[in-house]
Amino acid sequence: MLRFFKKKKKSHSSKSERYFQLKIKEVRKETGDTNSLIFEWPDRSFVYEPGQFLTLILPIKGREIRRSYSLCTSPYKNDNPAITVKRVESGIVSNYLNDHMKPGDIFEVMEPAGHFVPELIEGEANKYVMFAAGSGITPIISIIESILAVETKSHCTLVYQNRNENTVIFKERLERLRTQNPGRFEQIHVLSQPNEAWNGYRGRIDQAITSDILMDIAGNKIDRCTYFICGPSGFMATVTDTLADFEVPEKQIHKESFYTGDPKPQPSTEEIPSEQEISVKIHLDGEAYEVTVPSNKTILEAALDQDIDMPFSCQSGLCTACRGKLLNGRIKMDEDDGLSEEEINEGYILNCVSKPTGPGVEIEVG
């Protein structure tokens, strides 16, 4: 039975409500280096929005490792949630998931999270343009399918960058969407190394190709479309800069940063008292904790060192799984690309890349 849920208001969830046990129902090969993991629906409390992600908690070689993967399914269309994992060279988790997962396997995940989510209104007639590269298609296809299901008068165009015809993730699924939604969904593929018979766009998406595509699909209405962009940082910067050249308002541009490597420490550029420990109060799951944060640690690192079960995933300031709200005091964030300007103005921070710069810091998580 297809499940339709209203959006949940974000509330303080208990530790047990932040975690789910997911069982793999099916492993589906998408391309030579990409698999989809389709899960059984755990229970009715598992609710997600199009474009959100799951944080997987995996015991690998005696270590607990966390990684975030976007849900590639639509809550308005699909009975079973799924993620798609592209193998990354030397990637601990992506190789583990591609090589070892099988139906019946169970692992723990954090509740769905993320803000790369469309505001869908039934009866609206909007024009959406999606830019994706490689595995950046995973949240994008969730958003496309949801738009087509809810806003039945809206139109979507997907611009999708890949290496060649064989590396296009969801190739058949995208073609089905096109044939099932005539006049409402179009796809434009850009291939960097296509075969000789390819008659579409060749090369990597740059400002010239982006401009040509935008003029072709939107003409003089480029600044009236809503844009969703997901892929490597250079790709997203190119598309974003081109949209700025066309004077597209920032509020109409939505971006999701994809991080595929292992977490790396982030350098701090603000003066933080050296060799000084600062006490930070953290509100989590209805409890208040006092955490002592050394100058060489982030708030998340210090909390985990003191056995506080803080939510986290990438530890690089991109996935937002560790997001909290600054109630008092001052902090320094080494990376804020995962947050929108509006979220930053409202006081949200990413605990994995945040350090207190003085006393009186108080944070709410959840």
Image: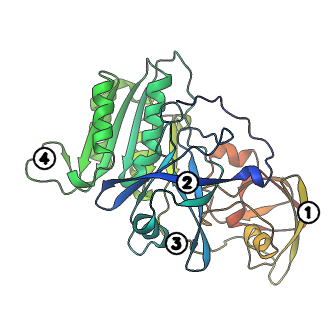
Dot 1: element: loop
Which of the two residues, 353 or 221, is positioned nearer the viewer here?
A: 353
**Precedes in sequence: disc 3 or disc 4:** 4
Say what amino acid the circle numbered 2 marks.
Lys
Query: Residue at the spot x=25%, y=47% of the render?
Result: 190
Counting from the top left corner in percent of width and height, residue 204 is at 27, 54
Single out the mark in the foreground, 3 or 1.
3
The type of residue carrying mark 1 is Gly
Between the C-alphas of marks 1 and 2, the distance is 43 Å
- Sequence-first disc among 1 and 2: 2
Tag 2 residue: 23
Q: Which residue is mark 1?
A: 360
Residue at image coords 56%, 38%? 117
Pick whichever of labels 3 and 1 is earlier in the sequence. 3
Residue 309, horizontal then vertical, whole percent: 77, 64
Dot 3 amino acid type:
Asp
Q: Answer whether labels 2 and 3 touch (C-beta < 8 Å).
A: no
Left or right of 164: which side holds 254? right
Mark in front: 1 vs 4: 4
